[in-house]
Image: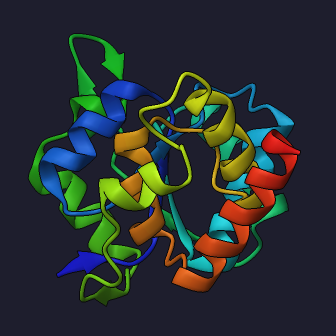
Amino acid sequence: MKIKEVIVVEGKDDITAVKAALDCEVIATGGSHINAELLKSIANIHERVGIIVLTDPDYSGKKIRRQIQKIAPGCKHAFIRRDDATKDGDIGVENASPEDIRAAIAAAKPEIVEKGIVYSKSDLIDYGLIGMPDSKIRREIFCDILGIGYCNGKQLLKRLTAFNISPEEFEKAGDEMCERVDG
């Protein structure tokens, strides 16, 4: 069983901490200066499967929450107490224990789902999304069409399932990507 919503955190260390505590998909904002493309992806993800915002209990974390709330109204919020996220004077989700992370996410009332459609490497190879000299460009276009944010091949396999991309959507995005790249 897996959390349906995607957890939005601030940085890579937060991703590591959340994935160590839960079976879920996690994306990072890269800090409080979130670019327009990532905000668009977060809004799209919210529409598809929902998001839970889990940011540091500090000013920057509050700023990120406000930005995301504007583009994803109705998103869920998870909070870790400041004391539980502080280690050696550093405040951050990455400092919280797995138990505290699980408790914060549980309080946000996530939806638990069975794993859905599973894609394979051969699905990606069929459209040149991996294993080709221009695979990176193909993935950039493909991910943009789906509105799921750029990622490498391994991440793409996870996102296709986590974001509930249907086989029909996959094929349509793949065909459109091929038209753009191959002419």
- Number of numbered discs: 0
- The image position of residue 83, as x and y in percent, is 27, 36
Front-most of residues 18 and 140? 140
User: In the shown orientation, is residue 140 left or right of residue 166?
Assistant: right
Query: Is residue 160 found left or right of 60 in the rendered image?
Result: left
Residue drawn at the location 76% of the way across and 53% of the way down: 177
Left or right of residue 14: residue 174: right
Q: Judge whether residue 83 can be spotted in this image.
A: no
Q: Give the image location of residue 81, x and y in percent.
A: 33, 47
Height in image: 61 above or below 80? Answer: above
Which residue is found at the position 74% from the left and 32% from the top? 34
Question: Is 121 or 82 nearer to us in this picture?
Answer: 121
> For residue 11, what is the image quadrant?
top left
Residue at image point 50% right, 30% down: 132
In this rendering, the answer to whether 154 lies above or below 89 is below
* Quarter residue 69 falls in: bottom right
Residue 121 pos. (x, y %): 32, 53
28 vs 1: above or below: above
Q: Quadrant of the N terminus?
A: bottom left
